[in-house]
Each structure stands twice: as C-alpha cells, then as structure tokens.
Image (tube, rainbow, N blue to C red):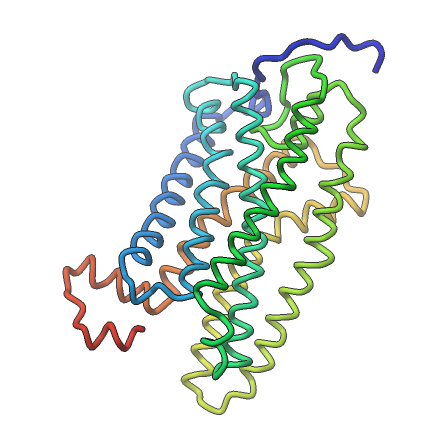
Amino acid sequence: MGNYTVNNVDSFIITGFDHLQNQKLLGSLILITYILVLLGNGINLCVISTNRHLHKPMYILICNLAVVDVMYSSTCSTTMISVLLADVKTVSYYSCISRMFFYHIGDFTECMALTLMAIDRLIAIRLPLRYHSIVTNSRTFLFIVLTWVIAIALMGVLTSAVDNAPYCQPVIKYVFCDYPSMIRAACVNPEPYFFLPAMINLWWFCGLFPFVMCTYAVLAYSVTKLSNNSSRKQMINTCLSHLVVLLSYYAPKIVSALLTRIGVVLTLTERNAILIISSLIPPLINPTVYCTRTKEIRKRLADVFLHRKVAPNNLKVLA
C-alpha cells in the first residue's frame, strides 16, 4: 500500500458497464423496470393512504415496504440510467456517499420489513382472537421506526468508514455506489472494512432468514389444521404471496454467498448482474404481488379504474 499516492477525490467514475456492447438496451430495460417500480409502489401508497379503512397494521407494513422499495431502487437505478443512457459516468464524491448511505438503509429496512410482515401473519393465524389487541397501529409504527433508527445508526458507521478512507484513484469498477465498491476503490486493505458488513450478513442469513422461514413453516402447519376449505385457500394464497416476496429478496444474495463459499470465482460482470437483479427485482415484484394478491387493494383499484363508488356498507365489510 506504500506505493500509492493518496489524492483528494471530488468525484468518481463508474466503469462497471464499460465492457458491455448493448449498453443502451440494458439502460432501457433498467429505465422501464424503474418506472414500473415507481408506478407499482406509488399505486400501493396512494390506495392505502387515501382509504382510512385500510389504515391497519398489515397495510401500514405494506406502505413501509413501498417506501423502502422506492428509496432502495432509486439510489441505484438513477446512477445506472445516467451512465447507460445519458453517458454520464461521473458521480460527485458526496453524491456517491449519500447514494451508498440510502441504498444500504433501503437494503437493511427491506429485510426488517419482510421480517415484521412475517411476524404479523404468524400472529394473525396462530392467535386470531388476540391479534387486534397484540398488533396495533401504534405498535406497528413503533417497530417500523425502530428498524429505521437501527438502519440509520449502522449505515452511519459504514458511511463514516468510507468517508475517512483514503482514495488513490477516482474509479469505481462496479455499476453504482455501494459500500463494497467504494471500499475497493480506496487505497486500503479492504478486509478490516468488511468485518461489520460480514456480521450484518451473518445476522441476516443465520438469524433473520431461518427465523422467517420457520414462521412460514408454522403457518403452513397451521393452514393444514383448518377445517374450512375457503379459509384454508385464503391462507395458502396469503402465505404464497409472502413467500414470493421473501425469496425474491433473499435468493440473489444467497446464490452469491453460496457460490463464493464453495470457491466459485465470479467475474465482475456476474457480480454486477447479481447486484442489479437483487436491487431491482424485489422492488418490482413486491407491489405486483400485493396489488394482485391482496383482496382489499385489488377491490379498491377496481373501484378507482372502473369509476365505481364504494358503498359505506362495503367499506365496513372491507374493514
């Protein structure tokens, strides 16, 4: 490391797409995906926030997930779109750090939001008579705020580490600004800097993910005990929709971690592909699943697009 000359870097150059031939095509696909993410999550937020009969814990959690998805996808998509379509590869130093900060907050809160939603469904099915006394709007807000506070604190530590690292050249070999790409752009030994992220990942993969899967195993067992076929079918649909959302988030991360652990060396292109998929697919799938699989949201959308007025009696039924 003594051969490097530390420079005052005021901007970074994103070079992760330089070797690709069809950059405009990829940029167009990312742009379309990003528009769909904004549209889907925006619809969920508008439908739930404007209908007071949907101001219940489960829908508050869906709103939180929609906000997280918009932030999570925006911090990376805007950079990739500007590089691929506008050919603007330079990102200012503080813009890069701020995008990294909000990107990882979105990543962390997405994981926590999925965990809270799994706990909510577990209580709803296992303790249906006590659900409304245990899971209240105020407690739901409290846990959501707590996850955001923890995320901001952890990412503040990572951001401080990045900001204090010395940089020798303003080149980021990945496709947008995140913690690993910025640390690898610094003229430091990266290993000590990855200790805290490694602990967070260990907590996700060995703690939260097994816990959430266990909750769905308990839910599946509970569903088999239901005697009412209609209730059983509804619970199965609910569990399947949540599992689709959960796996869309964890699958790319698990694949990347497993390949690395078994000794598979991923090329830069393969790493970037997994990074793009893990950053854009979950925010795209989440609103689609909840719009199509949640009866109340689906009915409300039908009322809006078909210009139907919802009768007060119907609203009471939905509530």
> Vertical placement of 245 versus 86: above or below?
below
Q: Quadrant of the C terminus?
A: bottom left
Q: Residue furthest right?
A: 2
Query: What is the quadrant of residue 299 in the picture?
Result: bottom left
Residue 34 at x, y percent in the picture: 41, 39
In the drawing, does residue 118 fall left or right of residue 318?
right
Residue 194 at x, y percent in the picture: 75, 36
Q: Residue furthest bottom?
A: 227
Query: What is the quadrant of residue 104 in the picture?
Result: top right
- Residues 173 and 200: in front is 200
- Residues 108 and 239: in front is 108
Q: Quadrant of the N terminus?
A: top right
> Vertical placement of 72 versus 164: above or below?
below
- At a point 45% along the width and 72% down the height, the residue shown is 237
- At a point 48% along the width and 47% down the height, the residue shown is 68
Residue 289 at x, y percent in the picture: 42, 59
- Residues 94 and 262: in front is 94
In the drawing, does residue 193 fall left or right of residue 293?
right
Query: What is the quadrant of residue 318 in the picture?
Result: bottom left
Residue 121 at x, y percent in the picture: 51, 71
In the drawing, does residue 89 fall left or right of residue 198?
left
- At a point 41% along the width and 20% down the height, the residue shown is 86
- At a point 59% along the width and 25% down the height, the residue shown is 16
Task: Tell me how many marks there are.
Answer: 0
